[in-house]
Image (cartoon, rainbow, N blue to C red):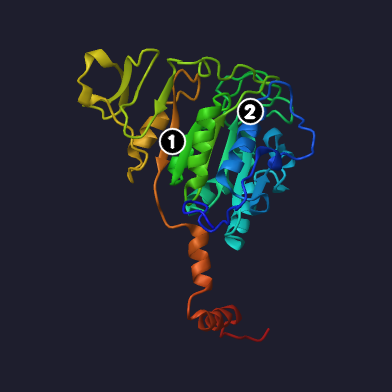
Amino acid sequence: MTTTTGLSQVPLSIEPLNRKEFVSSQEVRWCPGCGDYAVLSAFQGLMPDLGVKRENTVIVSGIGCSSRFPYYLDTYGIHSIHGRAPSIATGIAMARPDLAVWVVTGDGDALSIGGNHLIHALRRNVNITIMLFNNRIYGLTKGQYSPTSESGKVTKSTPAGSLDYPFNPVALALGAEATFVARTIDSDRKHLTQVLRRAVSHRGASLVEIYQNCPIFNDGAYDGLKEAGSPRVIPLTDGEPIVFGANRELGIVRDSKSGSLEVATVATVDEAEILRHDSHNPDAAQAFALARMTDSQQLSLSPIGVFRDVERPVYDDAARSQVTMPDRANRIVKMQHLIEGSDTWTV
């Protein structure tokens, strides 16, 4: 038996699986209070529900606190090179369609040294699921500013305040034409699990940004967003009006003159003016506009949910089809001719 979604070529277990099967014998070594614990627990709880056997699961990580993830799961795993996890995962996905391939990375690992690898994996639409833990700081190397740290951030590497303008990971992924882009929060287990389930069910490259707290070097980075019913969180639900606030008194509308998205009081506008969310829209313009509503400096507002979920040919599927085309032998001969060339010369 196989799945019919993003894991369409991955065999499922006939026997029921349980969480304990995915828990390794390794001692979990993160700082007390780290958001990574919550993500790990949610992930271990999700895997049995997916029905994917341990031997058909591969987790590739780079370098950083989040990259210890593979040690704590009793699956195949690779603790790879700084920033290069998407490239290694690409090779695995192309060679082994029978595997569910995950990438676990952080804001420093993915968006600094690994930025080029990340955007091209998304652009190519490789069938991998990327979990990007964003704590807006370098945790493993003890508190330097990262590509998502706000301007003016005082750290060990920016004692006078960072001069950089931060990346918006969701906007970056949408700009790279990713077919599945989402954002969730480490402390909201139900939402985190729902988003990860949709991400792995998507055929193609999925990126999930996870707001994750670092209690040692950047504690409270997401204060105000993690409170129940926070007026700063804009929940995105397909087919539903984009409204938020303690009493759903605020909504997202489009300015008739500038075309930009704005926050309006629901009681003061016509119901038809309030935008409805559609992650399946082939045009990513509204998803990008929603992503840009995230104040990457102060995080005063932040849409949470699936921004985009569309279909496009998958890179590794296409590559395998080329290899198995009927005229493969003839194409190999032509390729060899191109490599050898026809021009010769004497030196």
Mark 2 = which residue? 38
Q: Residues within 10 Å of mark 2 (few under 14, many from 20)?
A: some
Q: Residues within 10 Å of mark 1 (few under 14, many from 20)?
A: many
Based on the displayed image, in which of its 4 quarters is residue 94 positioned? bottom right
User: Which label belongs to residue 306?
Assistant: 1
User: What distance separates the C-alpha of mark 1 from that of mark 2?
Assistant: 20 Å
| Horizontal arrangement in the rendering, residue 343 relative to residue 171 (left or right) | right
Q: Is residue 65 above or below residue 302?
A: below
Residue 165 visible to an observer of this rendering: no
Q: Residue at x 47, y 36 (%)?
A: 182
Quick check: marks 1 and 2 in contact, CB under 8 Å?
no
Q: Amino acid at mark 2?
A: Ala
SS label for mark 1: strand
Q: Between 310 and 188, which is closer to the camera in this rendering? A: 188
Q: Which quadrant, please, contains the N terminus?
A: bottom right
Q: Residue at x 46, y 15 (%)?
A: 230
Residue 306 image point, x, y percent:
43, 36
| Horizontal arrangement in the rendering, residue 238 relative to residue 273 (left or right) | right
Residue 198 image point, x, y percent:
48, 41
Residue 100 image point, x, y percent:
59, 51
Mark 1 or mark 2, which is nearer to you?
2
SS label for mark 2: helix
Q: Is residue 303 above or below residue 227?
A: below
Q: Amino acid at mark 1?
A: Val
Q: Residue at x 53, y 31 (%)?
A: 192
Residue 318 visible to an observer of this rendering: yes
| Horizontal arrangement in the rendering, residue 112 relative to residue 168 (left or right) | right
